[in-house]
Amino acid sequence: MRVGLLTGGGDCPGLNAAIRALTKRLLLQGDAEVFGFEDGFRGMIEGDVRPVTYRDASGILTEGGTVLGSSNTADPFGYRSGEDVSDRALDCCEELGLDAVVAVGGDGTMAIAHRFQERGLPMIGVPKTIDNDLAETERTFGFDTAVSIATEALDRIHTTAQSHHRVMIVETMGRYAGWIALHAGAASGSDVILIPEIDYDPEAVAAVCRARDEDGQQFTIIAIAEGATPKGGDRIVQDTVEGSPDPVRLGGISGVLKEQLEPHVESEIRTTVLGHMQRGGTPTAFDRNLATAFGARAARLARAGRGGRMVALQGGAFTDVPLEAVAGKTRTVPPDDALVEAAQAVGTSFGTAETAPTRASSSS
């Protein structure tokens, strides 16, 4: 059989582990060829494709990024100036004689894969994104690494904040979901965690800062997701990228929060935007293993001729779900999430009067 493979959307740690697992499982079972599209769907559109051999898939497990390249501005259904060039992509797959295409990516990639599936091209999805916001799977690879990087950054910020008696605001990625800020904020003992799912009140955040000063703590650590919004406000858009399945790029909310707090807090306030460092570097052991399991399961689906599915993790078990159940959906932090409740229980504020600590305390 012949299987196409692409890594779409933004890069993240674990992509090479997934490429390795899928390729090796297919080739080790014999009678299979794997063809890698360069730079995601761009390679499918432009016919930029190459065979992926067993040797190509060796020695890449620990590497970050993707050996196939990626692109988040190559939507075949709205390419460059908005042109629908999906027929070109389908022709490319037909000329190669592909039995299936495995698309490794986030929600934008899964939405495109679903559209190709509807047009008759067997598509299999593998969920990756540092944002952990894909529907129907409780974990995507890349997330654990991003959380580890953000947690380390918050840990390092802690010592500077304490030494200089500052309010330190650290902005994480995550788009419309607060998973990274929540998990990194909780792991680092941040005093305030602000996520898109809970609109924050600037005065409630300022009250935490003042209470800590009065209690002798004299510093405050705030972890804020890029999609967080004040009550009655809007998300901060940093840029708009044409040709992307999700053209809006969020960012800059930490600077807005700094301006909101300065009139109400005596301490000096500094901001740090972690940005793309959360997506780079070698994947954690957890992400390597998760990507390996996802890649191997995707190979099994391809062998079985089961297109229109995405591999997933549900209830701690590996399974697969329909692409149509994933396309166009976002998995956000539920209000009753166990980690939200645990963080609140140890005195972490989520920027509202209801989530304020009952006494001045440091959650760290």
Image (cartoon, grey):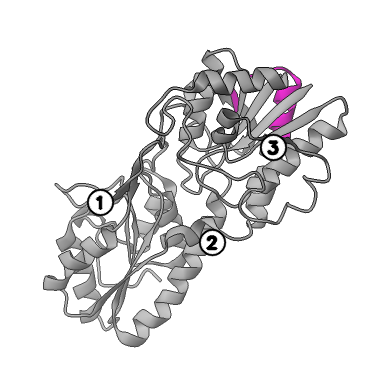
Q: Can residue 326 be spotted in the picture?
A: no
The answer to if 21 sits in the magenta stretch is no
Q: CA distance from mark 2 to mark 1?
A: 25 Å
Q: Can residue 130 be spotted in the picture?
A: yes
Quadrant of the frame with the C terminus: bottom left
Res 157 → quadrant: bottom left
x, y percent for residue 343: 39, 58
Q: Looking at the image, tell me whether mark 2 or mark 3 is earlier in sequence order.
A: 2
Q: Which residue is mark 3?
A: 295
Q: Are marks 1 and 3 in contact (CB under 8 Å)?
A: no
Res 310 → quadrant: top right
Quadrant of the frame with the N terminus: top right
Locate residue 97 relative to residue 55 in the image: left or right.
left
Looking at the rendered structure, the kind of residue marked 1 is Ile
x, y percent for residue 129: 51, 44
Count of numbered labels shown in the rendering: 3
Q: Looking at the image, tell me whether mark 1 or mark 3 is earlier in sequence order.
A: 1
x, y percent for residue 17: 69, 47
Residue shown at 30% from the left, 81% from the top: 217
Q: Which residue is mark 1?
A: 236
Res 266 → quadrant: bottom left
Task: Provide the residue span drawn in magenta.
Answer: 295-312
